[in-house]
Image: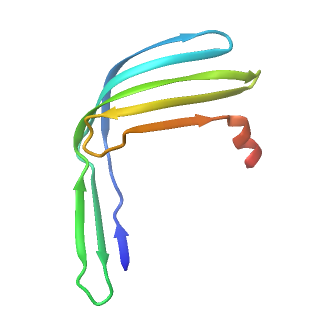
């Protein structure tokens, strides 16, 4: 089977509120927002051997809500660990949650 997907162009706008606390060693925040995709579209084409090609598309235009919590922690004078957890509600595409975490020093050691 041969599969091809076109590039995806997307424009998302968000409006919301956030609150947080910060001291010299850490920060914590919470964010609530409404998001809108203004018309992105995924186009693909696939073809099985000896069969006609099939074109498919999916409109990404949608409005949804997001709840995010996150923070940073100072590990050393120039090293921070940071992370965030995001959950989506009422989205057409089901991306129920997302977790991001990183220690920048570890990434630099890998390069």
Please name the residue shown 68% across and 35% down the image: 104
Please name the residue shown 56% across and 30% down the image: 83
Q: Position of residue 19 (x, y in %)?
A: 44, 13
Q: Quadrant of the N terminus?
A: bottom left
Residue 42 lies left or right of residue 29; in this view the side is left
Q: Position of residue 41 (x, y in %)?
A: 26, 54
Q: Position of residue 96 (x, y in %)?
A: 37, 39
Q: Position of residue 27 (x, y in %)?
A: 58, 16
Q: Is residue 76 above or below residue 54?
A: above
Question: Which quadrant holds residue 32?
Answer: top left
Q: Is residue 104 above or below residue 56?
A: above
Residue 11 lies left or right of residue 99; in this view the side is left
Please name the residue shown 49% across and 17% down the image: 29
Question: Looking at this view, is 84 or 7 the one in front?
Answer: 84
**Colour convention of the picture:** rainbow
* Total number of numbered discs in the rendering: 0
Q: Residue furthest bottom?
A: 50
Please name the residue shown 33% across and 21% down the image: 16
Q: Is residue 83 above or below residue 38?
A: above
Question: Looking at this view, is 43 or 87 the one in front?
Answer: 87
Question: Which quadrant holds residue 17?
Answer: top left
Residue 49 lies left or right of residue 58; in this view the side is right
């Amino acid at each position: 089977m041969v599969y091809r997907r076109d590039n995806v162009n997307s424009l998302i706008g968000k409006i919301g509120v956030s609150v947080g606390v910060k001291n010299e060693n850490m920060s914590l925040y919470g964010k609530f927002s409404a998001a809108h995709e203004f018309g992105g579209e995924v186009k693909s084409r696939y073809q099985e051997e000896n069969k006609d090609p099939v074109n498919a598309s999916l409109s990404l235009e949608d409005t949804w809500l997001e709840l995010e919590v996150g923070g940073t922690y100072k590990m050393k004078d120039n090293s921070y660990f940071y992370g965030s957890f995001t959950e989506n509600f009422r989205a057409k595409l089901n991306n129920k949650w997302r977790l991001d975490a990183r220690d920048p020093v570890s990434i630099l050691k890998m390069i």
